[in-house]
């Protein structure tokens, strides 16, 4: 079955630095990938998504990179701010109903 | 901006009791989901619901669980006889036809004693 995992459980960065959060997935047929941000006590919040026909997508201060060859996904956050402190999950779509299969999460801690 | 809402925010119950967790999805959405997150772990899929029936369910979603859309706006998750291991955050999500993004509610924290 599909599994999604993260390389680093905790990432600590200085305010203003760039952050990179990594994720690996197992199913080469996966075609839709999403990054979610989860702040303490809240539900997952959509950040950015990418389809398998792309290898890079940019949003506001965030970039997602997809390497299908090695089944790897990364989220880059530019000029990290204290408000970016949260747990970040990658997720892939699985099954006919587009259920989300989440990775284990990376805690991003931004030091002022 | 429309959002998914969930009630209650926190539910405490005794083992063996029935609980009903409630969700109001965004009004024009057609696909509904329940997920759960045990403390410190990843979010896990429970069930998806479309056209008034379950379209997919996970191994976690056994006979103790049921979902219902009783009145066209609410979407409920019932656990008939709660177990200690049901303690978790339960998230409802919805999405519209033709779009991939799922919108999550704030969650209900279920504590089974």
Image: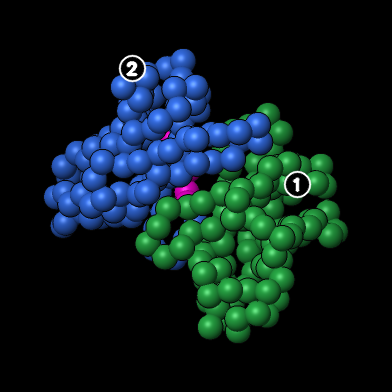
Chain colours: A blue, B green
Please, what is the dominant secondary structure of the magenta stretch? strand
Callout 1: chain: B
Q: How many marks?
A: 2
In space, the residues marked 1 and 2 are separated at their CA atoms by 35 Å
> Looking at the picture, do discs 1 and 2 lie on one chain?
no
Q: Which residues are magenta?
A: A44-48
Q: Nearer the viewer, residue A35 or A91?
A: A91
Query: Relative to B98, does residue B56 appear above or below in the rendering?
Result: below
Q: Is residue B108 visible?
A: yes
* Chain under callout 2: A
Quarter occupied by residue A62: top left
**Residue at image location 82% in from the left, 47% down from the top:** B52
Give the residue at mark 1: B54
From this viewpoint, which residue is outermost toward the right? B71
Q: Is residue B54 left or right of residue A28?
A: right
As drawn, the label of residue B18 is none
Percent from the top left, x then y, of residue B84? Answer: 53, 75
Secondary structure type for disc 1: strand
Instruction: Give the residue at mark 2.
Output: A69
In this view, A10 is above or below B97: below
Residue at point 53% right, 34% down? Answer: A93
Residue B108 sits above or below residue B33 on the image = below
Of helix, strand and loop, which one carries label 2?
loop
């Amino acid at each position: 079955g599909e599994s999604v995992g993260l390389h680093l459980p905790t990432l600590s960065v200085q305010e203003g630095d760039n952050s990179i959060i990594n994720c690996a997935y197992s199913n080469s047929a996966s075609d839709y990938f999403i990054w979610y941000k989860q702040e303490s006590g809240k539900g997952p919040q959509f950040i950015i998504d990418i389809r398998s026909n792309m290898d890079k997508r940019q949003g506001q201060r965030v970039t997602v990179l997809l390497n299908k060859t090695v089944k790897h996904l990364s989220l880059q956050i530019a000029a990290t701010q204290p408000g970016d402190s949260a747990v970040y999950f990658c997720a892939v779509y699985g099954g006919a109903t587009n259920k989300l299969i989440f990775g284990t999460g990376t805690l991003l801690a931004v030091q002022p | 901006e429309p959002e998914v809402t969930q009630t209650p925010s926190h539910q405490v119950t005794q083992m063996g009791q029935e609980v009903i967790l409630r969700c109001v999805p965004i009004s024009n959405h057609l696909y509904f989901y329940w997920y759960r997150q045990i403390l410190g772990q990843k979010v896990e899929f429970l069930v998806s619901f479309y056209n008034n029936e379950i379209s997919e369910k996970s191994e976690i979603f056994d006979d103790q669980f049921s979902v219902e859309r009783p009145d066209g706006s609410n979407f409920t998750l019932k656990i008939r006889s709660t177990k200690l291991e049901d303690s978790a955050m339960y998230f409802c999500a919805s999405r519209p036809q033709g779009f991939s993004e799922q919108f999550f509610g704030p969650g209900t924290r279920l504590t089974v004693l």
